[in-house]
Image (cartoon, coloured by chain):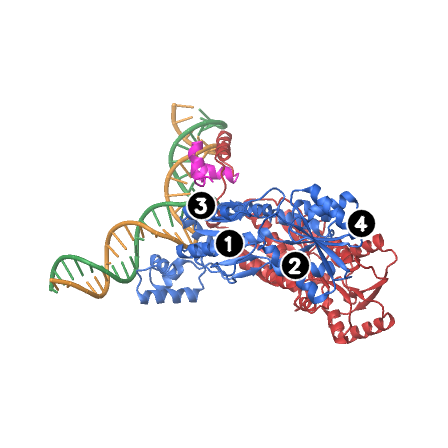
Chain colours: A blue, B red, C orange, D green
Amino acid sequence: MQTKKVTVKDIARLSGLSIGTVDRVMHNRSGVAEESRRKVMEAMESLGYTLNTNASLLANKKHYRICCLLPSFESGDYWELVYNAVASAQRDAEGYNLSIETLTYNQFSREEFIEAVERLKANLPQAVIVAPIYRNDTIELGHYLKEKGVPMVFIDSKVSEADYLAYYGIPMWESGYLAASLLLGDEPPQSIVNFRIERGGGITDNPTLARRHGFTDYVSENLPELRIYNEFLRPHDKEHNFAVMDKFFAAHPDIRHIVTFNSRVHLIADYITTRGLKGMSVLGFDILGQNIKAVQEGVVKYLIVQRTQVQLRRGVNALAEWLAFGTIPPLKDNYMPMDILVKENINFYSELYKDN
Amino acid sequence: MQTKKVTVKDIARLSGLSIGTVDRVMHNRSGVAEESRRKVMEAMESLGYTLNTNASLLANKKHYRICCLLPSFESGDYWELVYNAVASAQRDAEGYNLSIETLTYNQFSREEFIEAVERLKANLPQAVIVAPIYRNDTIELGHYLKEKGVPMVFIDSKVSEADYLAYYGIPMWESGYLAASLLLGDEPPQSIVNFRIERGGGITDNPTLARRHGFTDYVSENLPELRIYNEFLRPHDKEHNFAVMDKFFAAHPDIRHIVTFNSRVHLIADYITTRGLKGMSVLGFDILGQNIKAVQEGVVKYLIVQRTQVQLRRGVNALAEWLAFGTIPPLKDNYMPMDILVKENINFYSELYKDN
DNA sequence: TCTTATTTCGTGTACGTACACGAAATTTTC
DNA sequence: GAAAATTTCGTGTACGTACACGAAATAAGA
């Protein structure tokens, strides 16, 4: 334990210069002689100076704006989790000279994305957080921001070709691979069904695709014989979905393993509960309220989830440190944990995912 | 977005009093007329005042000491994780007027614990974090600290009867229950073995016991027929352990399910690797380096781990807020997540458990 | 009424950093 | 060699809160 914290005053005294000069060196501003700069550096070195964050933040009159460019959400859908995370980050940002805004777009409309980007440009913030959907447009945005000196952080998924400061999210391919190992690892069945819940004429080049690849890659490596049925459901058409599933299970009464790759596994849980099916092994993703319920009731066996709050918080932190101190994050690509939730441990996650 | 942050000056102006009076009200110090107190409160309410943490911490000349009372560790054992967490917390505490110390005792010696408590009393800190082993002595310590107005936080496990501010840790019973459901859930075997790795004449009333109960309760609820063999190993006697296991597996060649309830599953992984046993389902606890390796190599199938860093950080935060602002944590007992680690997701945990 | 306690409050300084302003020192120009 | 331009640096104030000190206002005692 050092007896006391080293301050600029200390290093000013040791270097025989004034606080002002020390300050100029620390912010490498102009107007300081080479010799003086050297002296200050040496003094800082030998005393082991560290910045007092509180004082710095207090004295810093600048105010930073961070803008989050995200898909809009409907209640109970994946993006709602991200919005909760943003809300939580906003609360954390109060008291710091930092405000967090959001700009949303319909994820199924490229026009809306482009429009959102225009709005972003019209009122440019000091930093940007993006959950990317449209590859090429995101790359272009990256170029633009680079030119303006505005750093960009990816969350949820990333566009490797773009210019970005850091990424915080789970590895999508690996999440699919993990799903396969959990669902099929112990007693591999003959065949399984993948219920794909997609928009009609939607985009196909989304992160979920990588997840599916992870799953199928596991299968071809370990269970080349396995038959995977693909059935298509709709997000908002319960009647249609029930008809599809009725038909499918009538034709394949032996199938007991079900997987879905997006966050809507609760639709299937609903079906299973309603029809009273027994002995099903169901795996899904994302910690939505309805999914939690399905796991608690034992209808969904495995839920693979990511720590949305942590990811966003780390993204905000990375940007805040870049803005305030010019710090570059030690790792560019930060792959964060995929948690495995089952009936027996899920109750101890909810608090964490709500507000931590 | 409010245009600007509300400061004490603002509420002083609105209430027609001075900053000093406002300050006295906020710290409910004496020497302020009832009428003035009311005015200040109203002004605070109507303007929505929130404390500027940075300024507060900067101006606060007090220096707080938090002392962690923990079992000492040998390299590669569970308590090393806790120490790493403390080290990380110490780093975070720099820059705040907060220092974190540790006081250690041999967990198998009640005398040492009592002695450590004496040392604690001799140099009393402003707050204490305890990982309790000895129930009664901990309760007594609680009484003493209560009297002195020193708050105590439990981590790792708790003594419900003691006087404590908060607890951060996993639910031990549930962790055993979870273990059983993972290891036995899919294709219940006829019999399994529990390798108990314990000190010779050690204490038996430790948290691990609750974990074992969780496991056996699951078994009696769901698999009353299951036979559980108990075999005893020693922490530091490889030769003896190998002999025990050789003998056991010679006598029970059909057993393929192994569980241990403390952090030393790597001892068994070592045996399995050395002997080249195949098709074993092994479950263990705690994210030690050697355990990680065993999971990565596919020798250990499930590792149930707790977020030691997070638990300690939250403990420190709770105490710091109590000390600085008098805030009482919203929840007294905070049960934190038990993460399930398997070969396919463990690589994305290491970073988190190291430094996050 | 005047003095003495006691309550109530305002002012001033400090925390460590950021930055503007202008003074001193140095270099350049004619 | 003096004046001007430029570089280099020190001083002062601000950020919002904490707290000591002492002044003003009120109450109590004679």
User: Circle 2 is placed at which residue position?
Assistant: A176
Kind of residue at disc 2: Gly
Q: Residues within 10 Å of mark 3 (few under 14, many from 20)?
A: few
**Position of B225 compared to A339: left or right?**
right
In percent of width and height, residue B190 lies at 86, 62
Q: Percent from the top left, x then y, of residue B319?
A: 59, 50
Report which residue position mark 3 lands on.
A119
Q: Position of residue B224 (x, y in %)?
A: 87, 55
Viewer-nearest residue: B173 or A281: A281
Q: CA distance from mark 2 to mark 3?
A: 35 Å
Looking at the image, tell me whether mark 3 or mark 1 is earlier in sequence order. 3
Q: Amino acid at mark 1?
A: Asn
Please indicate whether residue A108 sits to the left or right of residue A183 in the image.
left
Q: Are marks 4 and 3 in contact (CB under 8 Å)?
A: no
Identify the magenta region. Answer: B1-28
- Asked whether the residues under the numbered discs 3 and 1 touch, taking CB atoms below 8 Å apart as contact, a structural biologist would say no
Name the residue type under label 3. Answer: Arg
For mark 2, give the secondary structure. helix
Q: Are marks 4 and 3 on the same chain?
A: yes
Magenta highlight on residue B9:
yes
Disc 1 to disc 4, C-alpha distance = 46 Å
Q: Earlier in the sequence, mark 2 or mark 3?
A: 3
Answer above or below: position of A143 versus B56. Answer: below
Q: Establish if B237 lies above or below A121.
A: below
Q: Callout 2: 10 Å neighbours few (<14), some, many (20+)?
A: many
Numbered circle sitting on residue A278: 4
- N-terminal-most mark, 2 or 4: 2
Q: Nearer the viewer, residue A228 or A297?
A: A228
Tag 1 residue: A317
Quarter assignment of residue C27: bottom left
The answer for which chain carries disc 2 is A
